[in-house]
């Protein structure tokens, strides 16, 4: 937790704000950040104790935002399965830092106008 002036700011809030995530999107991203494996939607839903449809919709949004990877694995007997994992964790951290640095520059600019 960070403290800014008179308000405490959770890292969760910074990540959610940085990427415009809702709570379920954040929870899913956090799940993948803390587990370096690849998961199907069904496995994620089971582990996170969420409805499969909810996870499916959430995954689509995270893939669209390029925060997670969608990997197609072809099955030996035909067909395929999709697996999901986090994009490069270090790149994600750097992106958050860039967003925060932009905010600092904007805040400094506004303070200078006082």
Image (cartoon, helix red, strand yellow):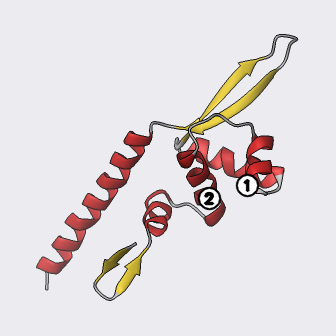
Q: Quadrant of the C terminus?
A: bottom left
Write the residue at 69% across / 37% down.
Answer: 39
Farthest residue to the bottom: give it: 6
Helix, strand or loop at label 2? It is helix
* 95 vs 110, nearest the viewer: 95
Helix, strand or loop at label 1? It is helix
Q: How many marks?
A: 2
Write the residue at 61% across / 51% down.
Answer: 31
Q: Do labels 1 and 2 touch, CB within 8 Å?
A: yes
* 77 vs 48, nearest the viewer: 48
Where residue 38 sits: x, y (%)? 64, 34
| Mark 1–mark 2 distance (CA, rounded to whole Å) | 9 Å
Q: Quadrant of the N terminus?
A: bottom left
Q: Earlier in the sequence, mark 1 or mark 2?
A: 2
Q: Quadrant of residue 112?
A: bottom left
Question: Which disc is residue 27 wearing?
Answer: 2
Write the residue at 80% across / 49% down.
Answer: 46
Residue 108 lies left or right of residue 78; in this view the side is left
Question: Which disc is residue 48 wearing?
Answer: 1
* 64 vs 75, nearest the viewer: 75
């Amino acid at each position: 937790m960070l403290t800014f002036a008179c308000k405490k700011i959770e890292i969760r809030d910074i990540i959610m704000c940085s990427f415009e995530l809702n709570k379920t999107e954040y929870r899913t991203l956090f799940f993948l950040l803390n587990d370096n494996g690849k998961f199907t939607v069904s496995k994620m839903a089971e582990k996170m104790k969420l409805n499969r449809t909810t996870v499916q919709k959430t995954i689509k949004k995270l893939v669209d935002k390029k925060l997670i990877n969608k990997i197609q694995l072809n099955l030996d007997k035909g067909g395929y399965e999709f697996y999901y994992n986090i994009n490069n964790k270090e790149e994600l951290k750097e992106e958050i830092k860039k967003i925060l640095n932009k905010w600092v520059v904007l805040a400094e600019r506004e303070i200078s106008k006082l």
